[in-house]
Image (spheres, grey):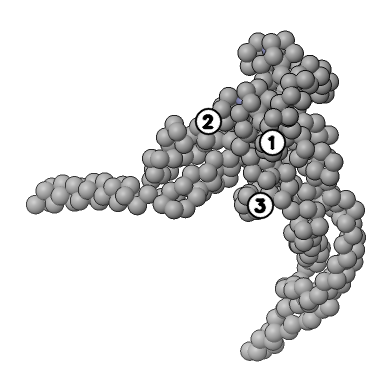
Amino acid sequence: MAETYKCPSCGAPIEFDGATGKMVCQYCETEVDVSAMDKIHDIYDESVVDETESEKEYCSFDGYRCDSCGAEIVTDENTSATFCSFCGSPTMIRGRLEGALKPQKVIPFRIQKDQAVAAYKKWAGKGLVTPSGFRKQSTIEKITGIYVPFWLYDYGSDAHVSAHATKRRTDRRGNTIYEHTDHFQVGRHIRADFEKIPADASEKMDDRTMDLLEPYNYSDLTDFQMPYLSGYQSEKFSYDSNELAKRAENRVREYILNEARQTITGYSSVSITSANVKLNRNKASYTLMPVWILNYKYKGKTHTFAMNGQTGKVVGKLPKSFGKIAAWFGGIFAGVSGLLMLLGGLLG
Ligand SMILES: [Zn+2]
Ligand SMILES: [Zn+2]
């Protein structure tokens, strides 16, 4: 079932507002607490129950229909929140947000669309040689707020790390310099708990980009409620917590080895020779993280602007337009040869 949250005062679609942390109606400015929204929604639902029943009888359509206008909601298999492409109503797909698919936590959006657009313009405007298509209004309008599915892993660890270390010294006797190298076998036993190691669970999102958007501030982690998704896109996970565990475990292993290395000090060289790391997964919680994203295709390659929807951190690499580079260097070269001519004139 596709659902749209409605304003209790005027009945218009109502969306989550990152600035106030509440549901805000864009038409009559009514504000409602997120936690009150589902109750209000149920009352609305009961009043339209007859209509949906009769609709079911003559309609064998197995997709989703817009709550507001009845048009088909365009989704793929992972979409859990989107907009009606016909009337623009924010739409949630409850069946993909319940049971085993129910997120445990969410970090709600804080960065609003106008802030994301401003950041994008700054990003795309920075390069002297950025292709102009990046700055077109029609491109900018595609910026999308999406809740990306993540798993947050908790691990307990017990690790034995061995390293080979050396100390070098020299001394001089008469005319001879003696070099000494002492070799040490160094061991470390590290026991540590790791909490909320993130791994993005969406197959569409580039892992590297998602990693670069970190860190998120976990103090905003909130119990999941569906109204937070109203006005945004959202996806359900495409990889379960077992499928992604390796990624989290590799990160934990890295942390442990770094930690071990940092405690082995006072040597000329240190190299880790063996690491026996035992990891115990305590928990994996399904969490939605806020991301503003804009994909732009340029010369057959997709370029991604991504912004952390909580902290505002921006990630993305712009391509260079070679036509523009030529013009730019041409400009410099013309300037230099002009100067040379001037000098030539002065000297002559
Ligand atoms: Zn309203
Ligand atoms: Zn609609």
Amino acid of disc 3: Glu
* Image depth: mark 1 or mark 3 in front: 1
Query: Which residue is painted at 81% across and 57% down in the image?
Result: 242
> Helix, strand or loop at disc 2?
helix
* Among numbered discs 1 and 3, the one appearing first in the sequence: 1
| Residue where numbered disc 1 is placed | 60
Kindly report the distance in space between the C-alpha atoms of the residues bearing marks 2 and 1. 45 Å
Mark 3, residues whose alpha carbon is within 10 Å: few (<14), some, or many (≥20)?
few
Ligand 2 quadrant assignment: top right
Q: Position of residue 232 (x, y in %)?
A: 65, 32
Marks 1 and 3 sit apart, C-alpha to C-alpha, by: 31 Å
Q: Classify residue 23 by image quadrant.
A: top right
Quadrant in the picture for residue 126: top left
Mark 2 burial class by Cα count in 10 Å: few <14, some 14-19, many 20+ = few
Please identify the quadrant where the N terminus is shown.
top right
Callout 2, which amino acid?
Ala
- Hey, what amino acid is under mark 1? Ser
* Drawn side of residue 306 relative to residue 57, left or right: left
User: Where is mark 3, residue-wise?
Assistant: 203
- Residue 68 vs residue 120: left or right? right
| Position of residue 212 measured from the top left corner of the image (x, y, whole percent) | 64, 49
Q: Secondary structure at mark 1?
A: loop
Crowding near the residue tagged with mark 1, few <14, some 14–19, many ≥20 C-alpha atoms within 10 Å: few
Q: Nearer the viewer, mark 3 or mark 2?
A: 3
The image shows residue 299, relative to residue 82, as above or below, that is: below
Q: Earlier in the sequence, mark 3 or mark 2?
A: 2
- The residue wearing badge 2 is 118
Give the SS element for disc 3: loop
